[in-house]
Image (cartoon, coloured by chain):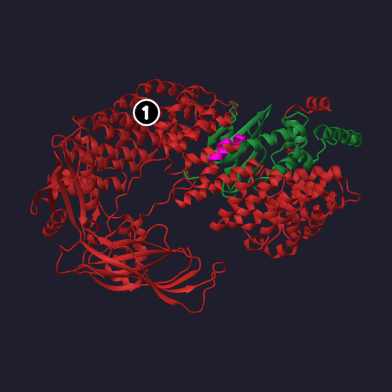
Chain colours: A red, B green
Amino acid sequence: MIKKFDKKDEESGSGSNPFQHLEKSAVLQEARIFNETPINPRRCLHILTKIIYLLNQGEHFGTTEATEAFFAMTRLFQSNDQTLRRMCYLTIKEMANISEDVIIVTSSLTKDMTGKEDVYRGPAIRALCRITDTTMLQAIERYMKQAIVDKVPSVSSSALVSSLHMVKMSYDVVKRWVNEAQEAASSDNIMVQYHALGLLYHLRKNDRLAVTKMLNKFTKSGLKSPFAYCMLIRIASKLLDETEGGHDSPLFDFIESCLRNKNEMVVYEAASAIVHMPNCTARELAPAVSVLQLFCSSPKAALRYAAVRTLNKVAMKHPSAVTACNLDLENLITDSNRSIATLAITTLLKTGSESSVDRLMKQISSFVSEISDEFKVVVVQAISALCQKYPRKHSVMMNFLSNMLRDDGGFEYKRAIVDCIISIIEENPESKETGLAHLCEFIEDCEHTVLATKILHLLGKEGPRTPQPSKYIRFIFNRVVLESEAVRAAAVSALAKFGAQNDDLLPSVLVLMQRCMMDSDDEVRDRATFYMNVLQQKQKALNAAYIFNGLSVSIPGLEKSLHQYTLEPSEKPFDMKSVPLATTPITEPKTEIAPVATSKLPEKLARSRQDIYQEQLAAIPEFQSLGPLFKSSEPVQLTEAETEYVVRCVKHTFARHMVFQFDCTNTLNDQLLQKVVVQMEPSEAYEVIHYIPAPSLPYSQPGSCYSLVRLPDDDPTAVSCTFSCTMKYLVRDCDPNTGEPDDDGYDDEYVLEDLEVTVADHIQKILKPNFGAAWDEVGDEFEKEETFALASVRTLDEAVGNIISFLGMQPCERSDKVPENKNSHVLFLAGVFRGGHDVLVRARLALADGVTMQVTVRSSEETVVDVILASVG
Amino acid sequence: MDSTSLEPSLYTVKAVFILDNDGNRLLSKYYDPELYPSMKEQKNFERNVFNKTHKADNEIAFLEGMTIVYKSSIDLFFYVVGSAQENELMLMSVLNCMFESLTHILRKNVERRCLLDNMEGVFLVVDEIIDGGVILESDPLQVLQKVNYRLMSEPAYGFVLLDYITGNLEAQTDRSQLL
């Protein structure tokens, strides 16, 4: 038979494809022979294959032609050819969405699914469930229940998997089959076991107790299927994750016991589950790491990859736990699978010593061009982490990065490199000049507008403060000549910063600006004209306000306010202070060094948390007259984590009022709460003027109630206050299963923890990129200075952290990082006080038997200065 | 990628495809409707995967946020795709099962021409291994038993009868070997 193939190949030329020149219309024409009697199974089979092949290639079938072919196909059920029948099932599944009236085959399929031919039954069930909708499901329910507990494994598996697919569509019907699924779970067949477990979990996953019970049962009885074991491990680790407790539970013991399973798949799943658990101790990790270590020398590439990828994860949090594997990882750095080699090297970079860095970097640069962009990003992130660990190695890294920057690569990859260089520059002042030089070279030939503008912005910020600012001007002005509008505009802004900072460069910058005023683009011309005029004034305050420290308002907020202003014409000029301030984005520490899934969606303009709150609050009529939202605090927990009701509070500050938003969750499934309010008793002259209750709080659905409080007008220094809070509500007991409440209820209350309002709630963080300029701009009209001794504080780091969190202000000029081995430090803080007054704080700290602190406060308003000093004291 | 463990679910396989040595699609199934919903995105993805994998037989790769296990034979490439957090060994077991089942069905002749001549068998094998993203079976012997497929050659009509007889005989011997 094989010989015959060879002969045919010679005739038609090897590599010919019998389906290559298929025409849809010709195939559909051929499908007419379905109607011939007697049926020719061989030919019909071939035509069905062609139809499925065409569908698979993405050929589009119109509804009419698809329906026609489908109806013709139904005649083939008369033939008893096995393969032909099986292909009919496949065709039904493929055409279920494109043909009309597919349900006409229901009776044929039901007959096959309950018939004597076991070969037909499983596939018939799967085809039938594919074309069944909720209403029809009732009709076949009886057969499905029987099929789930059928003795033939393929029938039972097919029924279970099809039920799982239908859970999304008709949960309520499938839920009734839970007993049958339970029975199937004790089947001897490993796949039936696995499928039954999957279905059971899916039906019960919202019921914690039932899941726990199920898990107990199966972990004790011991399953045979490795797939089912993997599933159990995932369920167990999810439960563990939700309990937030320690790991000395039977669940953890179960996962750990799976490390000794004889199937590699299960062992790996267990190791990976342990590694991914948050706050795992080194002792708990050790057994998982040692099985992964064994896998590193497996002949199977997939297993080596899985092991080293997971070790890489461990190394991010617990580098010391992985050091034991260093030798095995060393063997992998020359692995022919470059993904494995890359992961091994990046892991070693995290765990190895400073001395091995050079060698590893050399190894990796030998094949960096061969690996995919995803892994190049991993490498860059590893380097970035390394630079923080070994600052002295920055010159090696910088060289390596600049070489990578010159290679080809996608946007994500280049962005990772640029971000990494920028972070090195920020961490190590001595690497600033080389870093900037590399970036300058990069923008000479950069196709990504976003990166070019980002770098230009950085040059504008850092360049003027280097010893030789003039050398950057050339690079920046080249952009003005060569690039697109967005980049040209950014270049103009950067130039202006050089002119404002360096007096000796000012004349040349002005000449360049003059040229930019001839630009063909509006934005570039506008910027040039604006900066030109500001610079010509030669006033420090103007420079600070309009060139160094730009707008600090929230952009969506500004858009909304301006829109509102144009809707209501008035004589008054637009007031910038009425616009909510931008919240400084909290840069989250980068925890993910693993390959990042590239997002496929275009990034939406992320709205800040505050913009969302602003919108929510504005929708409540009582709060509409309060003006713009000034600040929203982080949520404060007012209950313990594991109590009947979970309440957290967000404090929203307005110009003269505060709104407390209580997010409440009812964790009792036999209660429905109604008319929920949190009553507040203030300790100071604060006045509660309004409560807005949450109308109803069903089990596990969070709801919010609000309290509106007026701030004392007569005493502006009263910034702190303590509220004692009590939650009051109407309880209606209800049936835990149906959620149906009783008719009448009773009043009840629940005491919450006290809520504090502090000075930080009145100050919004604001970043002044150039603190010195801002300091001069505010001036010393209301400057006050005082010295404090912080006796209880032992280190400068701790003192800096305390001050920042107490005042709730933004550290500027990276002054929140205290250099090592220093006895004194200066902290710069900037913020805006409620009502729109800028506040700047300079704190000089000195370490000697506790920390001594000299605080200087400047503001445009005297009371604000007093408030801050009073609250620090 | 979120670092938390993945939601326990039976939906393991995101996609399966078989390409020829020019990267053309011979068979492909996408099980997650959110992953590459359009034909153009699917073919782009396949092209990208092919370009990154056809030079070296490395068994596993990570692309576009997906874990991909693969295997090649003469002029064919077999791929199984799962999410980034998926257990790589599970994906491997699917790939191995598919490959071994097809090896049997095609009488060790795992090359493009033979595969295309027996396309219906290939469709049926894939259908028995994965159903809507759920691993239905991972044991090749079971798959072969369920598919119960006879090798077929191009229908040169004079040979149909002969083929039928020999094919049937062979299928029987084949089964007795398997069982």
Left or right, A652 with respect to A859, comes to right
Q: Main secondary structure of the magenta part?
A: helix
Q: Residue at x 24, y 64 (%)?
A: A722
Front residue of A296/A243: it is A243
Residue in the picture at 45% in, 25% down = A326
- Residue A616 position, x and y percent, is 37, 64
Residue at 25% in and 62% down: A578
- Please tell me whether residue A733 belongs to the stretch shown in magenta: no
- In this rendering, the count of numbered labels is 1
**What is the magenta range?**
A256-264
Q: Residue A725: percent from the left, percent from the top?
A: 31, 67
Most foreground residue, A779 or A446: A779
Task: Find residue A130 and report its horizontal and vertical position in percent.
Answer: 70, 55
Query: Taking A830 as reference, is A567 left or right?
Result: right
Q: Quadrant of residue B135?
A: top right
Q: Which residue is mark 1?
A: A401
Q: Is residue A183 above or below residue A847?
A: below
Residue A594 in sight here? no
Q: Say whether residue A596 is left or right of residue B30.
A: left
Q: Nearer the viewer, residue B37 or A247?
A: A247
In the figure, B38 relative to A387: above or below?
below
Query: Which residue is rendered at x = 49% and y = 73% of the image?
Result: A733
